Image (tube, rainbow, N blue to C red):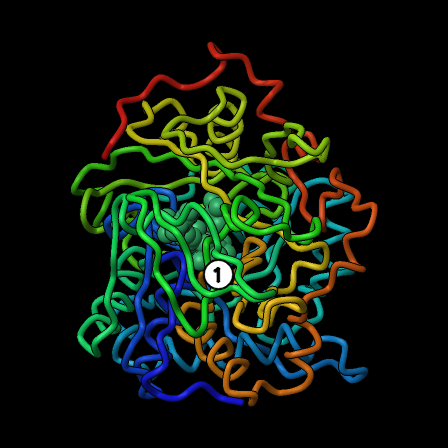
Amino acid sequence: MAPSKDASILVVGAGTFGCSTALHLARRGYTNVTVLDPYELPSPISAGNDVNKIIEEGSPDSDDGSNYVSQRILQVAYEGWIKDPVFTPYFHNTGFIIAAHTPAGLEQLTKREMVHKKSEYEWLDDAADFKKTMPEGVLTGDFPNWKGGWKKEGAGWVFARGALMSAFRAAQSLGVKFVTGDPGNVTKLMEEGGDIVGVETKDGKQHRAELTILAAGANAPQLLDMKDQLRPTAWTLAHIKMTEEECKLYKDLPVLFNLESGFFMEPDAERGELKICDEHPGYCNWSTSPSGHRQSVPFAKQQVPLESEARVREFLSHTMPHLSSRPLVFARICWCADTPDRNFLISHHPDYKSLVLAVGGSGHGFMHITSVGGFVVDLVEGGLESRLREAFRWRPETAVDRDWENVQGRRGGPNKVMNFGDVGEDEWTSLESRL
Ligand code: FAD
């Protein structure tokens, strides 16, 4: 049964999923919503607090229906980017280039992504083809063995931090309360009478609620036994400073994404910095819990391993060698949480009727900030369409004896999930932190 419109609702986490959920709850008329987060927005540990993220529109479903969920949620998300005034200012419909350069990567590009067969992609066969996708002087590299596809519209990038803050402000203006700092730092879900009745925060306060929605991203397993359905995994990003002239030249570029070496979008408008991500299956931070269970525990760090910096420079040397030795001005690790099938986990908890999970961004969650909260509210009101409900369900059976080393379809770097435990203290960048 749907909660009453004045029911007390707590959202734990004001990141991508939390802000989206807060906005959609407020838009549906819920008047007593509080969002808790340890940090003032934008939270420095939110995966959504970033200069840019890739986005694409959905395609029609495949004939056998196997793509229904991924394509349906992309279609709904994209509607938000082109129609919802909270989000439209942040979308840049610049197009998207997807590429690979090793035999295995090229096989993935053609067999799984089917790029060569899709009519919306122009095939890029050599360095000259890649260079013509951008103004002269941008792509100066040799693109060794690169091939790829160029989709000219219906994809691009979004100014992520701007969109996150816009969702936050819109939710706040509709009456949602945001509590940050120690008073928003949830230390425990309160269990009473076989249900979750609210949370405790670091300042020692108890917050009772009729409904609690856990949207704490990669930190969710710190608060609830997720039965191995979430694997907190970190990726790496680095910024270099661009000149004013370069910022003009690099404006409105398509996204360039090599699925086995890295990607970049245009420099951000605030600081004139170009963000580069090196592509790889991710890093975990393995430890053993007091009960002897293997767990990857997130930690915040505004540095990246030197091996990641080297991969960034190699990516630049193939694409834009004139930038490949420029110093980094910022870098960070960024945590997300993978489910075994990389579908979101948006579900009631089977044992606690007043607890809802909104987690499992699985590396593609940001583009859904426009709409993911709508699915959460649909679920709460009993109206989530059945195929999405099935895909997003609480599904511990998919994580029994989970293969923690599974690359989950990702490539790059050593083509394996890496362990921060193997990175020595002196094997990190030493850049100034930004708070
Ligand atoms: P988050 O946004 O991380 O939010 C979690 C929130 O919970 C944070 O605000 C945190 O402060 C809060 N929190 C933590 N602990 C507590 C606590 N104890 N109490 C209360 N609150 C707490 N997606 C795309 O669509 N396109 C991309 O191009 C893309 N690129 C990415 C690149 C990188 C490097 C990474 C790491 C991710 C990328 N993603 C991308 C994925 C996307 O960013 C995530 O899927 C999405 O942001 C996850 O949202 P979330 O709300 O689950 O987590």
Q: Residue at x 65, y 30 (%)?
A: 290
Q: Is residue 99 left or right of residue 199?
A: right
Q: Residue at x 27, y 81 (%)?
A: 31
The foreground one among 79 and 188 is 188
Task: Say whether residue 134 is visible.
Answer: no
Percent of width and height locating residue 291: 70, 34
Q: Is residue 27 above or below residue 403?
A: below
Report which residue position mark 1 lands on. 214
Percent of width and height locating residue 380: 51, 81
| Quadrant of the image containing the N terminus | bottom right
Q: Residue at x 57, y 51 (%)?
A: 224
Q: Is residue 145 above or below residue 266?
A: above
Question: For residue 87, which quarter of the picture?
Answer: bottom left
Local crowd size for mark 1, using a 10 Å CA cut-off: few (<14), some (14–19), many (≥20): many
Q: Residue at x 70, y 55 (%)?
A: 109
Q: Is residue 126 left or right of residue 324?
A: right
Percent of width and height locating residue 137: 34, 42
Percent of width and height locating residue 94: 38, 65
Residue type at mark 1 is Leu
| Quadrant of the image containing the C terminus | top left
Question: For residue 419, which quarter of the picture?
Answer: top right
Q: Is residue 173 above or below residue 407?
A: below
Q: Residue furthest top?
A: 426
